[in-house]
Amino acid sequence: MSQRYAKLYAKAAENPDIGELLEDDPLAVSLFFLAIARADVYGILPADPRRFRARVAPAAALSSATVAQSLHNLESHGLVRRYTASDGTELLHIVHYSDYQDVRWANRIGPPEYELPPWWEPPEAFLAYLESLDLSRVRGEDKRKKWVVLRERYCSATVALRENNPTQNTEHRTQNTEDVNVNVNTNGNDLLSESADDALPDAAIDAPPADPPATTPKRKQRKAMTDDEAESMIALARADLPPGCLDLVETLMDLVAAQNKTGRMALSREATLTTDLADKCKRDGIGTDALRHGLTAAISKGAGNINYVIKAANGYDPARASPGQPSRNGKAFQLMSDGSRCYVEDWSLTQQHYIAIWQAEGVWDAHTGCTTEPRTGACCNDGWYYANDDNGTLQRERRIST
């Protein structure tokens, strides 16, 4: 079974864009170098995150949102460029692919499987191969047509004319080539004669070549994530989260936004946080109950931090009460208006949602299972159950039974 190998030029380490991205997103750089080995010889790969992951890193447990973020970072640093083919296929081009790979075009390379982008620049070796290709020996009409199109697009008018006349006498063409070589060699001997050297001034012979002016590579400006890209990443990340946790995730994001001076959070920031949460849940095998526990703990502490959520989730023990929520029988509960207790394992999603909000507001008393201030649909420490009237005004509805 034949194996395919990819070379990696040492100069790749000198690329300032790769160096900068390595500091910010090592995963993106890893995917970039894996992509070099997995791309076709034209540097083309699928751009869809799921298809890209399946082609480039099939053994890695990466979410689609994580791959999408890495592709965005690669594109913003000018290392890849995405485009849409005429048939609607989303594709990706590794910019300057030939700078990292040495393709032996003469080894019976086939035409590209995917449509090439309009900015694709053919390497010199590819042009030489394309010009020397004998189309009469190409098997398959589809392949032959593709090569014809490539010649018309990239080669000179002379070559394009030659490919339309494949019955040309090969021996005659070879003879002409040999004649030209003889003439070139003869002329070359004349130019290298002693008299030609004598005609050059001493300064031109003895002076060392001037060093090229030093240039500082300019960093490419990062491409900002659009709102559409951010919303797509958020949707992908939410789909990867354990089920039944989105209400608390939204509460956590509201908490993070509230900690900003503006009280708002950019969609790109929310996309990054949600993706980070989904990835770490998958990495640590965190399920619904553990994640809800971690989110509730973070919200109650006012800690809008993904690492805090994950740490609390990993410490979840269903046999013990949640940290900071002491109660009868070691379980968290909510006091009902009839004096009974609804324990945490029986809480509905609506109860979990509102209790998390009250914890974030600092008005939840875990010892009594009540709020410290009046809230709709909750018993309060003042001994009353509160609800809204027909006009939406919060009011006392009934005393809590004892």
Image (tube, rainbow, N blue to C red):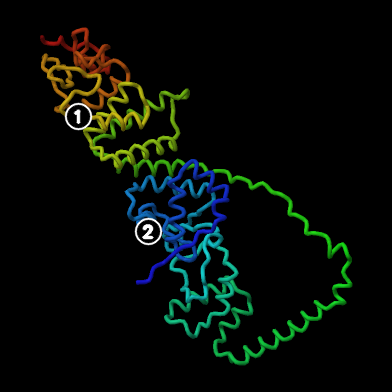
Q: Is residue 398 above or below residue 62?
A: above
The amino acid at mark 1 is Asp
Q: Residues within 10 Å of mark 1 (few under 14, many from 20)?
A: few
Q: Nearer the viewer, residue 308 or 83?
A: 308
Q: How many marks?
A: 2
| Mark positioned earlier in the residue sequence (2 or 1) | 2
The residue that label 2 is drawn on is 55
Q: Residue at x 38, y 71 (%)?
A: 2
Residue 51 picture quarter: bottom left
The residue that label 1 is drawn on is 317
Question: What percent of the width, then of the height, locates residue 30?
Answer: 44, 50
Q: Residues within 10 Å of mark 2 (few under 14, many from 20)?
A: some
Q: Residue at x 38, y 45 (%)?
A: 66
Where's the C terminus, which quadrant? top left
User: In this rendering, which labeled residue sits more in front, label 2 or label 1?
Assistant: 1
Q: Is 14 left, or right, of 48 in this rendering?
A: right
